[in-house]
């Protein structure tokens, strides 16, 4: 492992054009194969968890699964609806929809109780989650009807229309994040390197790594179905780590070049950088990959999809840094050498000079407390991080379902108007019962009794007749019970509890041989949150163990491993606390342009905890590697810590600026869930780079002294000293 990055870099440095051409071919091949095979999207069966999942599986067994259904709402601009105009528009809608090949059936128009609206329900062909792919022609026909009947307002909403709108908005957000992230990243790199060429290299490698990862993710989706969330995260993580890995490698090569003063060839300098930064990049990438892999333990298609995309983009970013980057550095270095030779021939002094590991005034000020009073700095910084983490204990998890989507989407505004006119559509619970066909009469009678109980319950729509469906073989029955309260509201959740805990046992509890369960929008969301909460201890436990073992393996020190876990916990806890403080309430809505969900999206904490651990370990590897280099060279522990922190502070901070910029760009997106992810990641990286790496880590290591590094105070691993360049690689 220690020698592999050096061997690869040596080959790349001596075969530059082959390495560059090979990388481009790899990217094109990955993207081409991915586009050729396409993406295998997750189906409804892949999302099933808990009792709701069992209910949906039983319904599907009887051919009664939920179908992709849209509703066309016909209403007046104000006042009471003109019945004749509405009926004419409804007839036009019905005729047009029935003529479409995407449509399976069109229901008869239904008038609202208050007479202000007319609704036409349209069922699309195919599975529930494929509705968004086929709804386009329906929306076009609805728009044509609206033009043909100007005296009424004709609009369309429903699961397919909303899913398409969310997907379109996600695409717009992806383009927006690119427009924000790429220019700011380039500007940051220009400040760091002062050269367009050197700034362009990290960005180029990050973008090609992202392109290759997109292709590989399409291929991987045929093993792990894609849940539709990986594209944003591949861009988010890929741009951050891709730039960071290249940045660390580039900065190290520039340090070696400045220190060599023109005495080493570009090939030798690249090999020296590979022996230190190259190894650290590999170890860091492995740490992020192992941390992310724990998401598979969540047994959830969304997290599995996230894990696959993240692992692939990080792996490709590491691959680009250790393969094609050395070749690019040699090509750039040779141009630098030719310029130096021309300057020498003209009698001018060379520009190269020994590198000075300066931190700058700001970073030196931040390092000062840990250097002068490590015990006090450690206690105060730890208390501050714990204080920031406190709000996380009051975190309320909610499932970001349809009711939480942005009202910037027209389909969501129509959805609100539809629910106002037809409250029975707001929330539906699907009670599924399966038994032998001979028991069908008893099951029907029991479900009818359940419907009557619900009709008399104030948590359900009064006077609404529940719909009872039966499979062709009579084994499966589905009763749809309506509640006028939204899925995330207290009464909406209470209505689910009433069905499951009161009405269902009372109606079907006495029947033997009947299997029953409840699904629906509320049940899906609540069971999903429960499922995640149950898997959380397993994922977190595996994450802590992987982080500890990875750090011990890299640095051969149990103390360093324990310290890394504790510091990562502080960083993740503080960022999650700030997430709750900002997004769970409503005080920051105007500042960050979001509508509070009253809680945190249920997928966000687990995803962030895992990714934050990986990114924190990422920075930890680079900082500790510099300290170990000094330690293995014989420098006493205290001096090695100060030297390593000082030499790495500037590049770590520069990398953090890039990451914070990329992640903060996601706060400008529309989806609140993505806003929460971007905000938390940006805050976590900022805290980790400033508080943890410049205060907590150096203070702890200074207090531990030689004890941190195991027996003899020496360790071998990711940060061992670089080998001396062979004599034939010297130039001049």
Image: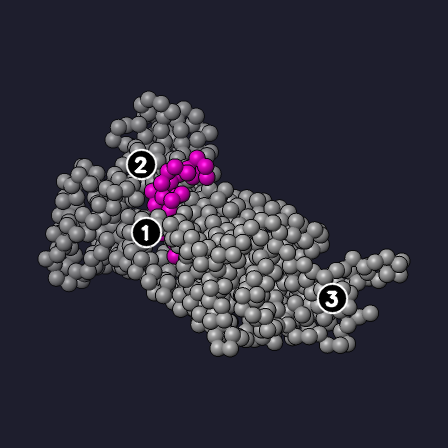
In-image side of 458 versus 200 (left or right): left
Secondary structure under badge 2? helix
Q: Is the residue under label 3 in contact with that under label 1 (CB below 8 Å)?
A: no
Using a 10 Å C-alpha cutoff, classify the residue at mark 1 as few (fewer than 14 neighbours), some (14 to 19) or many (20 or more): few
Quadrant of image for the C terminus: bottom right
Residue 672, above or below 277: above
Q: In which quarter of the view is residue 326 placed?
A: bottom right
Residue 392, above or below 281: above
At 58% from the left edge and 49% from the top edge, which residue is drawn? 362
Tell me, what colour scheme is on the image?
one colour
At 42% from the left edge and 27% from the top edge, which residue is drawn? 149
Using a 10 Å C-alpha cutoff, classify the residue at mark 2 as few (fewer than 14 neighbours), some (14 to 19) or many (20 or more): some
Q: CA distance from mark 3 to mark 2?
A: 72 Å
Q: Which residue is mark 3?
A: 260
Sequence-wise first label, 3 or 2: 3
Q: Which residue is mark 1?
A: 393
Q: Residue 419 — which label?
A: 2
Magenta run includes residue 705: no
Q: Is the residue under label 2 in contact with that under label 3 (CB below 8 Å)?
A: no
Query: What segment is highlighted magenta in the picture?
Result: 580-606
Secondary structure under badge 1? helix
* Residue 452 point in image, percent of width and height: 14, 44
At 47% from the left edge and 49% from the top edge, which residue is drawn? 683
């Amino acid at each position: 492992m220690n020698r592999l990055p050096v061997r690869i870099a040596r080959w790349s440095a001596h075969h530059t054009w082959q390495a560059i051409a090979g990388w481009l071919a790899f990217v094109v091949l990955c993207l081409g194969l991915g586009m050729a095979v396409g993406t295998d999207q997750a189906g409804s069966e892949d999302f099933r968890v808990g009792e709701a999942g069992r209910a949906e599986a039983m319904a599907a067994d009887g051919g009664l699964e939920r179908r992709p259904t849209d509703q066309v709402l016909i209403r007046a601009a104000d006042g009471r609806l003109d019945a004749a105009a509405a009926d004419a528009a409804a007839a036009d809608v019905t005729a047009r929809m029935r003529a479409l090949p995407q449509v399976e059936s069109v229901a008869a128009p239904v008038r609202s109780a208050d007479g202000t609206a007319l609704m036409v329900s349209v069922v699309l062909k195919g599975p529930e989650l494929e509705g968004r792919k086929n709804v386009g022609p329906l929306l076009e026909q609805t728009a044509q009807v609206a033009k043909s009947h100007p005296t009424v307002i004709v609009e369309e909403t429903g699961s397919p229309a909303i899913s398409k709108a969310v997907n379109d908005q996600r695409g717009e957000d992806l383009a927006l994040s690119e427009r924000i992230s790429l220019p700011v990243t380039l500007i940051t790199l220009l400040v760091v390197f002062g050269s367009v060429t050197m700034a362009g290299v990290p960005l180029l490698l990050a973008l090609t790594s992202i392109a290759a990862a997109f292709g590989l993710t399409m291929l991987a989706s045929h093993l792990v179905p894609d849940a539709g969330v990986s594209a944003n995260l591949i861009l988010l993580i890929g741009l951050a780590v891709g730039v960071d890995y290249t940045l660390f490698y580039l900065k190290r090569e520039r340090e070696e070049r400045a220190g060599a003063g023109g005495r080493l060839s570009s090939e030798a300098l690249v090999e020296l950088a590979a022996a230190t930064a190259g190894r650290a990049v590999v170890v860091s990438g492995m740490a992020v990959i192992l941390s992310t892999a724990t998401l598979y333990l969540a047994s959830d298609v969304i997290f599995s999809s996230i894990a696959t995309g993240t692992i692939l983009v990080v792996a490709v970013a590491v691959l680009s840094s250790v393969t094609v980057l050395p070749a690019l550095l040699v090509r750039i270095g040779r141009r630098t050498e030719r310029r130096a030779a021309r300057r020498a021939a003209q009698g001018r002094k060379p520009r190269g000079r020994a590198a000075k590991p300066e931190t700058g005034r700001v970073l030196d000020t931040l390092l000062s407390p840990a250097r002068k009073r490590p015990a006090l700095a450690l206690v105060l910084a730890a208390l501050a991080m714990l204080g920031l983490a406190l709000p996380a204990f009051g975190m309320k998890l909610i499932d970001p379902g349809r009711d939480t989507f942005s009202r910037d989407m027209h389909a969501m505004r129509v959805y609100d108007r539809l629910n106002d006119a037809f409250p029975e559509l707001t929330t539906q619970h699907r009670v599924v019962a399966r038994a032998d066909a001979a028991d069908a009469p008893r099951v029907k009678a029991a479900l009818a009794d359940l419907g009557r109980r619900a009709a008399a319950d104030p948590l359900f729509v009064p006077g609404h007749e529940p719909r009872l469906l039966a499979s062709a073989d009579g084994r499966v029955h589905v009763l749809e019970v309506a509640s006028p309260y939204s899925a995330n509201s207290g009464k909406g959740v209470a209505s689910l509890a009433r069905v499951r805990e009161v009405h269902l046992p009372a109606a079907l509890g006495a029947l033997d041989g009947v299997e029953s369960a409840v699904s629906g929008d509320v049940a899906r969301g609540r069971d999903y949150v429960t499922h995640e909460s149950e898997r959380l201890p397993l994922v977190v436990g595996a994450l802590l163990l992987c982080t500890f073992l990875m750090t011990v393996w890299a640095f051969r020190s149990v103390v360093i491993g324990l310290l890394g876990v504790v510091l990562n916990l502080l960083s993740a806890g503080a960022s999650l606390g700030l997430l709750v403080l900002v997004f769970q309430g409503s005080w920051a809505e105007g500042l960050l342009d979001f509508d509070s969900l009253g809680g945190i999206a249920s997928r966000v904490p687990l995803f962030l905890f895992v990714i934050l651990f990986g990114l924190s370990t990422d920075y930890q590897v680079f900082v500790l590697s510099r300290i170990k280099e000094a330690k293995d060279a014989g420098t006493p522990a205290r001096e090695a810590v100060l030297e390593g922190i000082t030499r790495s502070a500037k590049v770590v901070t520069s990398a953090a600026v890039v990451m914070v910029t990329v992640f903060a760009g996601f706060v400008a997106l529309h989806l609140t869930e993505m806003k929460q992810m971007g905000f938390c990641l940006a805050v976590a990286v900022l805290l980790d780079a400033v508080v943890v790496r410049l205060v907590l880590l150096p203070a702890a290591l200074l207090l531990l002294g030689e004890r941190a590094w195991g027996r003899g105070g020496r360790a071998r691993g990711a940060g061992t000293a670089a080998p001396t360049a062979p004599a034939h690689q010297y130039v001049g």
